[in-house]
Amino acid sequence: MLASRRLVAIWAAHLPQRARDGQWVPVIEALLKDTIDLGHASYRAYRSEYRRARAERRPPPELTGVLAREWAARLPEHDVIGLLRELVMSVHPADGTAFRWARPVRHALAGLLCHDIEACGGEPWSAYTDLTTVRVVDATFFLGPVLETGPLLARAVLDLAAADAAAGVPLTERMRAWPKIAETDAALHDRVLAAHLAAHPPRPTEGAGVETVEEWWDLAMETVVRLLANPPTPEGARLAALCWTPARPRTPPASGSRRGRRSARHRPPKHSDGCCRSTPTRRSSALPRPARPTRPPPTRTAWARRR
């Protein structure tokens, strides 16, 4: 069974770019779904054997032994990462040709991530896994079998979004397939969205219009508010730091005095910058101030009326 899977994976990875059509994407999607199912089935088999050993009062089995037995028919790590890399790189090939099935690839990667979330049985991968340390497109070495496919799939979604951003694809089109991730796991969707927004803020000098900057700003602030209500994540911390840190002024202060240098150094960025329009601090007027309670007018007592 493993030999047949590997032959299909090698064929799909080495198929020429001009021969990749609408039937090529479902083949890779089926191979990766099979890998996801086998991975989670092995962990379920280990948990069942562990409970059985506890009930029979015998030593628990070793995790490595169970995984090695269950993963005998599973694709190795370099094949899994190779298939994900080919999906990402086929959307924007190096020769500059247009790929007609770019939208199916985006939906396929988002669907694979949703399938991994549903197959894990309510036990997702760790929230402390930093997605910036995961490699798919630029992976250079492989340590062994893939223990968790979730971070790899999330990294593939981010790599494709990064390639779309470099090619000038609008933000709405990049995230067209992401609502299904939000329906499956809202917290994971916010992590992926925060990672992409923090890595690719709009730059007005690079041709981003006012609408693009406003869209990024509104989406980033909504995501930060949701992430602050949940346990901390590395992606949420980066986006929050990007949104709430004032930008360094690009021009030196007009006055040479110490007060002028200090005011220019703490001047909030302009509205057209790619990061934040202003930094809501304790003295900033960007956030609405709570209204002060009004004291009712004093009433005249009986002794005051008699006077």
Image (cartoon, grey):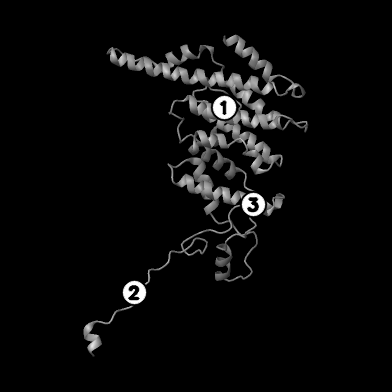
Q: Name the residue under label 2.
A: 296
Alpha carbon distance from label 3 to label 2: 46 Å
Say which amino acid is labelled 2.
Pro
* Circle 1 SS class: helix
Whether residue 164 sits left or right of residue 282 in the image: it is right
Q: Closer to the observer: label 3 or label 2?
A: 2
Q: Closer to the observer: label 2 or label 1?
A: 2
Task: Judge whether 157 appears above or below 49 on screen.
Answer: below
Whether residue 5 sits left or right of residue 96 in the image: it is left
Q: Kindly indicate the quadrant of the structure image that contains residue 298.
A: bottom left
* Tag shown at residue 213: 3
In the picture, which quadrant includes the N terminus?
A: top right
Alpha carbon distance from label 3 to label 1: 30 Å
Q: Name the residue under label 1.
A: 112
- Residue sitting at x 59%, y 65%: 264
Q: Can residue 138 be seen in this view?
A: no
Is the residue marked by circle 3 packed among few (<14), some (14-19), or many (20+) residues within 10 Å?
Answer: many
- Residue sitting at x 58%, y 69%: 260
In the picture, which quadrant includes the C terminus?
A: bottom left
